[in-house]
Amino acid sequence: MSDFKRMVASDTDSVIFNLDELAGLHQVDGRQVPVIFDEVTLEKMKSQPKYADGYNTATRLILVRPTDLPGKPAEGAYLELDGKIYIVKSVTGRLIWRIALEANR
């Protein structure tokens, strides 16, 4: 692993997912893990013309470290977040997973 990759990995843990800064502990599928809610990006996604007709049904956008979950959630799978069931709409990213969730109706 290069020095740069080590620095990025270190920053991910010590800065981005710092519980005193951006992240908070939440229950994800029965595990208590650091989670960041990205409401700003979610609202930007919803305001884009291609999503304005309701195509984007995401109700939550969360950021988690891949090491905090047992595996990458599959699109269409159910994910429990703080006692509420959601459907995984998409998962993107490598060092940090951005998971778009839709409320189960």
Image (cartoon, grey):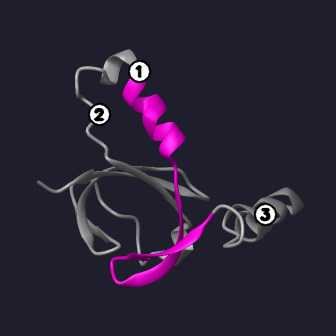
- Circle 3 sits on which residue? 11
Q: Is residue 11 magenta?
A: no
Precedes in sequence: disc 1 or disc 3: 3
- Circle 1 sits on which residue? 48
Position of 72 relative to 25 (above/below)? above
| Amino acid of disc 3 | Asp
- Circle 2 sits on which residue? 56
Magenta region: 23-47
Which type of secondary structure does the marked residue at label 2 adopt?
Answer: loop
Would residue 28 be found to the left or right of residue 75 on screen?
Answer: right
Residue displayed at 70% across by 61% down: 16
Q: Are marks 2 and 1 in contact (CB under 8 Å)?
A: yes
- Give the percent coordinates (x, y) of residue 97: 51, 57
| Amino acid of disc 1 | Gln
| Amino acid of disc 2 | Asn
The N terminus: image quadrant: bottom right
